[in-house]
Image (cartoon, rainbow, N blue to C red):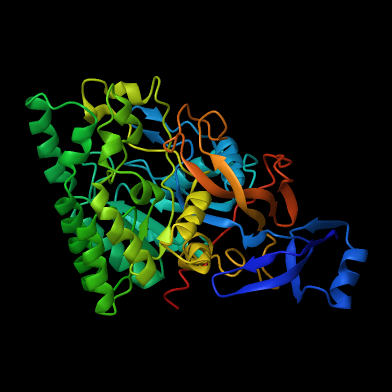
Amino acid sequence: MSRTVIRGGLVITAADEIHADVLVEGGRVVALAAHGPEYALGWSESADRVIDATGKYVIPGGVDAHTHMDFPFGGTASCDTFATGTQAAAWGGTTTIIDFAVQTRGKSLRDGLDTWHAKSDAQCAVDYAFHMILSDVNEHTLKEMDLLVGEGVTSFKLFTAYPGVFYSDDGQILRAMQRAAGNGGLVMMHAENGIAIDVLVEQALAEGRTDPRYHGEVRRTLLEAEATHRTIQLARVAGAPLYVVHVSAEEAVAELTQARDKGLPVFGETCPQYLFLSTDNLAEPDFEGAKYVCSTPLRPREHQAALWRGLRTNDLQVVSTDHCPFCFRGQKELGRGDFSKIPNGMPGVENRMDLLHQAVLDGHISRRRWIEIACAAPARMFGLYPKKGTITPGADADIVVYDPHAEQIMSAETHHMNVDYSAYEGRRVTGRVETLLSRGELVIDRREFTGRAGHGQYVPRATSQYLS
């Protein structure tokens, strides 16, 4: 049983900041001790490996609860595989991803889940779990929800968007929510009024408004707010909890805040692209704006203040990436002359932890809140805590030695995601991963990748720990 000691760092969790040494044995955290006592020094003498974290942060590995590796969409597929995507995640300080298995219409949930297990098996550099996308709510798939919860797939995503692809009507959503209320599952909602958006898309294209920026204009903030409000009310009728993904608009935050002020079990996630980018990017000339096409879309810059405020007040609990990369050449270009054909999605799994550390330096959030929204809260939300998301005896030794002073310039030249552009090209940030352990094994050792495909294990999940 290998023994590792991480010495001299500032251990930061969602609850504490303590100068402590960390003892790791057999892939788990065994103990923490204040710097200097003789027994902590004794740990080092008997250790197989001692990592010097002096002047560095020692933080839990990030939990990215929203990724789409090898995801078919719009006639193509996202260009990160589970192998490339989890390697990039590690470089960015993330040690667990929760990806979305997709039910194909007319087929079973089990069939979709098996497909995603086949894609990911023996491919991942870090640990992974699955949510289930429900494309077809019927008596058979409702019964399957119970079976999936029993084996550790405890969250189900539905869409009020994408008619003809993923869209569910209010009756189907209500039935799925009622089932989740009974089996302990958590319904995740992509909340945009897709029926109305399709009308606006058709009108925009007929009027010759075909550039990427119109993607943002037709997907109105009010249509995000309306769908958020509607699905909250459906969840109330069903007596079920609700998690709204990729919240981007001030009006949608207001709907979540109002529901939470009533004490309802309603939760919200936002993503770095909504915190750091805006419609200015969608409007970049020469079709460059296509790089920033995702749904929900980027919003005018003034919405960012409401998102940061929601993160500080806990009306938004989680920052995930919705990592769904499509290359500019050959994939995003499918929408030249018709913004509705641009594959929806952006890269980001490697950037999240560093961007949020920059937000600490910029005064938007505290250090502990950084760890809360990127590690602990997603782990609790999706039944992985305290195995994941913290540094405490018994937790998996998913640990990052993070250099808070290292400067980097984000660029497609240097990132590890399998995509030909960076959404943050040229952005200077301070802070980066120096060393990363996944279950006690070195995946990144002083800025050198030492991991391997197949180290990452599939992790069955408990039900949401915010509901028990």
Quadrant housing the N terminus = bottom right
Q: Is residue 450 left or right of residue 247?
A: right
How far across and how far down the image is residue 182, in percent?
36, 72
Q: Nearer the viewer, residue 446 or 87?
A: 446
Quadrant housing the C terminus = bottom left
**Residue at the right extreme, as displayed:** 45
Q: Is residue 417 left or right of residue 76?
A: right
Q: How many marks?
A: 0
Q: Is residue 167 left or right of residue 324?
A: left
Q: Nearer the viewer, residue 234 or 279?
A: 279
How far across and how far down the image is residue 18, in percent?
66, 73
Q: Nearer the viewer, residue 298 or 451?
A: 298
Q: Is residue 452 above or below residue 79?
A: below
Q: Residue at x 57, y 53 (%)?
A: 96
Residue 120 figure quarter: top right
Residue 316 visible in rendering: no
Q: Is residue 399 above or below residue 285?
A: below
How far across and how far down the image is residue 322, in percent?
41, 47
How far across and how far down the image is residue 119, in percent?
54, 38
Q: Residue at x 59, y 75 (%)?
A: 16
Residue 99 visible in rendering: yes
